[in-house]
Structure formats: structure tokens, C-alpha cells
Image (cartoon, rainbow, N blue to C red):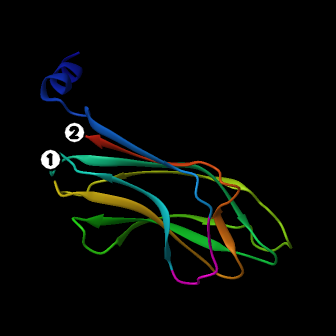
Amino acid sequence: DSAVTAAKATGFGKIGQVISASYNDNSNTTSTSAVASPFLATITPTATSSKVMVWIDGGRSSYGSGACEGTSWLYRNIDGGSFAEVVRMKTGCRAGGTDGYAKTSLAFNYLHSPSTTSTLIYKVYFKTNSNTWYLNSDNARVTVTLMEILA
């Protein structure tokens, strides 16, 4: 098929590089403003037309006593600048309940078009609306994987 042949000839959709970082850090917050988690990975795209596929997986999200509702985001940093929000990831902590552990894993993916060849750091930020939110508890493994998709 000519469409497939043209794509192969020009290299569209090929994988440039894959970066992966794993963490076993417990991470929790009582902050009602977004705070940085330890979960991050760094990549330097080879072309401004490259896209970066971000996967975040694993962990055990839970909450302490009382009702809790939280939010997490994917942030990025370009060449050592300040971190800026890319996209909201999810709402965590089950609303309501007492001393519960509605343990769910982080499961997130996002295709980002950063339009840069500068070094990028992707990092998870999170906050709670009340009480303590454990973004990761029980020293569970969290993996952040970045894949460069060449245009």
C-alpha cells in the first residue's frame, strides 16, 4: 500500500528514544496548593517536530482519616526554567469515608508536543482539598516513561 510505503520512507511515527525512571518513594500531602512529588523523568527531544509520549504507572493512592479529595497534574520544565502545568492527570482520594484506603494505582498517558530540542523534565504535582492524600503509599513502585515519537 502506497500510504504505508510513504510513511516508512519518511520515518513518520518512529521511536527516537525511550527514557524510564522508577521510584519507590512514599509521597503524601496536606497542601491545598499543588506541590511537587518525587516522580519525574528527563528527555531531550532530537527535533522540534518530535512528540513525547508520557506514561505514569504504578503506586498506591490512598487517603488518611476523614474525607479527602485531591488532584494531580503533569508539569514540565524546559532547560532548568520553572515548572509549568501541561495537563491535569486525575482526581484521587475517594471523597467521603473514614480511615479508608481506597487504594488505586496511578495510570496516566499523554502525548505532548513540546516543540523544543531543549532538555525537558516531566514531573507529577498534586494537592488535596482536605486531610492527607497519599499519592503513593506502601513504598509501591511508580514508573515514569517518556518516549520520543519522531515526526
In magenta, the rendered stretch is: 27-33
Badge 1 density bin: few <14, some 14–19, many ≥20, Cα 10 Å: some
Q: Circle 2 sits on which residue?
A: 150
Residue type pointed to by label 1: Ala
Q: Quadrant of residue 15?
A: top left
Secondary structure under tag 2 reads: loop
Q: Which mark is residue 47?
A: 1
Q: Nearer the viewer, residue 119 or 52?
A: 119
For marks 1 and 2, give the CA distance. Answer: 8 Å
Q: Considering only vertical position in the picture, is 20 above or below 96?
A: above
Q: Position of residue 16 (x, y in %)?
A: 24, 36
**Residue placed at 52% from the left, 83% from the top?**
33
| Residue 54 left/right relative to 80 | right
* Residue shown at 58% from the left, 58% from the top: 25
Residue 115 on image: x %, y %: 19, 57
Q: Where residue 24 sits in the image (x, y, percent)?
A: 58, 52
